[in-house]
Image (spheres, rainbow, N blue to C red):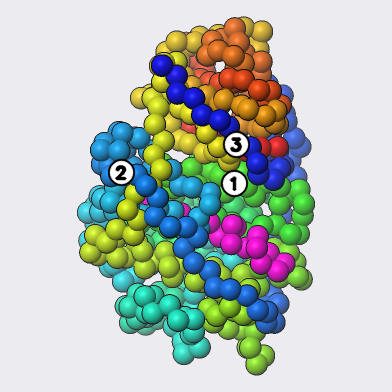
Amino acid sequence: MLRRAALLLALASCGAPPGMMDDDGGLELEPDAGPMADAGPGPADGGSADGGDTGDGGGALDGGGGSTDAGGGVDAGGEADGLFVYPFDRTHSPLTAQHVRALGVIAARAPRSVDAFMKVGDSNTVNPNFLGCFAGANVDLGGRVALQPTLDALKTTRLSGTTPFERVSRSATVGWSAGAALAGTPPPVEQELSATNARFATVMFGTNDIQAMNLDAYGRAMFSLVDWLAARGVVPLLTSIPPRDDSATADAQVPWYNGVTRALAQARGVPFVDLERELRLLPNHGLSTADGLHLNVFVQNGAARGCVLTGAGLQFGHNRRNLLTLEALRRARDAVASGAVADVGGAVRRGTGTRADPIVVDSLPFVDVRDTRRDGARTIDTYGACSPANEGGPEVLYRLDVTQSRAVRAVVVSLGAADVDVHLLQGSATGAACVARNDKAVTATLTSGAWFLALDTFVSSGAERAGEYALVVLPQ
């Protein structure tokens, strides 16, 4: 029996994601915006403002436990009989007993220092205002005494004579996109890991990746990076990228890139910090007014004070990111070191992706990661008038029950050697019900009724291109 849920589409509209040439015969959706050189670490752009402190962004959610797989991700089966969802209405992703076990699986792969972390990212990570001030005396936690033990432990660690906070990372460089961290022999991330033996890695990419308008490439690079870290016993702490106030076109892409990052973290069961969510509420989005691209910082008595975490300080981008990162480090460190569970449970997504048991899209935005080598079923080979393409491999089905007409866009990012196409079906989960199909994305106004998304495996020269994919669905 099909499970039904009303589709809630009440969020602000988002720009269409970047398009790419459909290698199955589709059309290019949007032109390439061209390359951009990163503007560098950026100006301080300080000042002071009044405002409230930031918190967790949400309380504990009702849900169950679960089991972990060998890859360190959260198993879709296990005790919870589903995948724990990372909700969009909180800043820190849930850290349930299931997630703690997943982090334990990662940590068991290599003996590393629980009091060391490495930085992985671009210019907003290179900037000394990111975490560096925690090594000094100008720190004001704004009364958050629970953060002090983590701060003290990390501050006493020495990595070649410096603390993890102020260390100049080999895996963070101005102008980098996500693929740079694993490029070269040995790759920069391996060099940094060898130098730090860090148990944790703060990871934030996407600001520069947007310029290439290639969401597929970003997704493949990020999944490869996170899996590389986890395989070596490093717990990745993924952070969403800031808004792009330098360009409305670029800013429209931010939710799509952050959607892929959230989907990755959710699938692997690793921490996700929604920095974008916090920055959208700040003056100038916490960005420098000089370029609208780099995080700004609180200035007091003529000096940058990125570790002043008072109401005034937290009106600035670096200060807000520093608080969220220290909170994430505390949560992850406590989980790995002592098995501490921060959340009692969480919302669980169920469904096997078959015609009899589709995955329900019950609200937007929506993100998911599946693998057609193990998920879904092999029931639809062709899609009627939509396309003559051979989709004879396994497909995963999603159901949307719409109560109010609304425009949506669904984007699939095929990972590794996979080639998974997206199909929009109206009324029934059959090929004949197809109304739109593309190798990357479909956009449509959904009227009241039942709709389905079929994420199907393309067959090329008799070979099924099955594999893992990330799905992001946003209102338009």
What segment is highlighted magenta in the picture? 268-285
Cα–Cα gap, marks 1 and 2:
29 Å
Above or below 403: residue 187: below
Q: Residues within 10 Å of mark 1 (few under 14, many from 20)?
A: many
Cα–Cα gap, marks 3 and 1:
22 Å
- The answer to whether marks 3 and 1 mark residues whose Cβ atoms lie closer than 8 Å is no
Does the segment drawn in magenta span residue 270? yes
Q: Which residue is mark 3?
A: 8
Q: Residue 184: in sight, yes or no?
A: no
The quadrant in which the N terminus is found is: top left
Residue shown at 74% from the left, 59% from the top: 245
Residue 61 locus on image (x, y percent): 40, 50
Location of residue 421 by image quarter: top right
- Total labels: the figure holds 3
**Residue type at mark 1?**
Tyr
Answer left or right for 454 relative to 355: right
Above or below 3: residue 82: below
Cα–Cα gap, marks 3 and 2:
24 Å
Q: Which residue is mark 1?
A: 257
Answer left or right for 451 relative to 166: right
The one of 230 and 296 positioned closer to us in this rendering:
296
Residue 428 locus on image (x, y percent): 55, 12
Per the image, label 3 sits on a secondary structure element best described as loop
Location of residue 400 by image quarter: top right
Q: Which residue is mark 2?
A: 64
Residue 249 locus on image (x, y percent): 76, 48
